[in-house]
């Protein structure tokens, strides 16, 4: 091999090493998490009403629900009609080195939906239209990976396990024999695909998805301690027995077991 070719080979290997190191922001091995995929991201300002409410996933006040500003609204291609609510993603800024903050990534929970705008084509203003993969972040989260002037940024994302403090939360609402349960603070896969409820005088009763992670059933479960069985999208099922005492009431929230993260 000539001296010139040897020098070129060393330069190429050095550049490859620098590129890998520049974007490496996670200690987890690729076998533990999904592969990186391309998408784009924009942000909304703190004054936007979506900052105070949970939007399409039904989480309500995101601060009180424990999600804070580490949240994201997803486009149609990613939202899966609400089933994705509660899933966690790692997001990093790529390609545009003028605006990206090198070596950074953020972890966010899916809490909202970015509605399509069919008045514009997907490649000309309809940023959340199918088939676009698009993330809408609070500006506080966006600025951890990019300068705010970047606006609509190319990013990469991957699905990761959620880490949450404490147990799953079951917020009970409804009236009479109609019972609605909002399931939040879910670790592990994060998103719920099936839920069951049991009173002390019943067997296990399957609940239907109402919207987001709100689950409902028509059954008279008053004056009975309540247990919950929850299945996440990775197929793991977790049972929390007698989460609510027999004197539970609508409007109360109870804490159950938690998935491994």
Image (cartoon, rainbow, N blue to C red):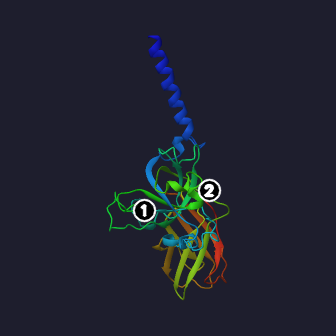
* Residue 70 in sight: no
For residue 136, above or below residue 23: below
CA distance separating discs 2 and 1: 23 Å
- Quarter of the figure that contains the N terminus: top left
- For marks 2 and 1, the one nearer the N-term is 1
For residue 220, above or below residue 10: below
- Residue 17, quarter of the rendered image: top right
Q: Residue at x 41, y 56 (%)?
A: 133
Q: Which of the two marks, 2 or 1, is nearer to us in this view? A: 1
Q: Residue at x 51, y 73 (%)?
A: 214
- The residue where tag 1 is placed is 75
- Residue 132, quarter of the rendered image: bottom left
Residue 255, percent from left and from top = 65, 70
Residue 115, percent from left and from top = 41, 68
- Quarter of the figure that contains the C terminus: bottom right
**Mark 1: which secondary structure?**
loop
Residue 35, percent from left and from top = 47, 45
**Mark 2: which secondary structure?**
loop
Callout 2: 10 Å neighbours few (<14), some, many (20+)?
Answer: some
Q: Residue at x 48, y 47 (%)?
A: 34
Q: Residue furthest bottom?
A: 176
- The residue where tag 2 is placed is 163
Front-lying residue, 212 or 257: 212
| Picture disc at residue 175 | none
């Amino acid at each position: 091999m000539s001296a010139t070719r040897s020098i070129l080979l060393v330069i190429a290997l050095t550049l490859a090493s620098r590129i890998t190191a520049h974007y490496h922001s996670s200690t987890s091995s690729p076998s533990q998490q999904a592969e990186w995929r391309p998408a784009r991201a924009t942000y909304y300002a703190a004054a936007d009403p979506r900052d105070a409410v949970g939007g399409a996933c039904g989480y309500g006040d995101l601060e009180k629900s424990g999600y804070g500003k580490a949240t994201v609204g997803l486009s149609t291609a990613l939202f899966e009609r609400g089933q994705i609510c509660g899933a966690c993603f790692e997001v990093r800024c790529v390609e545009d080195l003028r605006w990206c903050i090198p070596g950074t990534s953020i972890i966010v929970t899916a809490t909202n939906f970015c509605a399509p705008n069919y008045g514009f084509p997907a490649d000309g203003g309809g940023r959340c239209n199918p088939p676009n993969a698009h993330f809408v972040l609070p500006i506080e989260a966006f600025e951890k990976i990019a300068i705010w002037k970047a606006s609509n940024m190319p990013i990469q994302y991957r699905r990761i396990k959620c880490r949450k403090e404490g147990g799953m939360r079951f917020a009970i609402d409804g009236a009479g024999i109609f019972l609605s349960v909002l399931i939040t603070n879910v670790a592990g896969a994060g998103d719920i695909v099936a839920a069951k409820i049991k009173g002390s005088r019943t067997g296990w009763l399957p609940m239907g998805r109402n919207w987001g992670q709100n689950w409902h059933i028509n059954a008279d479960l008053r004056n009975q301690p309540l247990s919950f069985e929850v299945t996440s999208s990775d197929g793991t099922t977790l049972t929390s027995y007698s989460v609510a005492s027999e004197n539970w009431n609508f409007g109360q929230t109870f804490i159950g077991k938690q998935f491994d993260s």
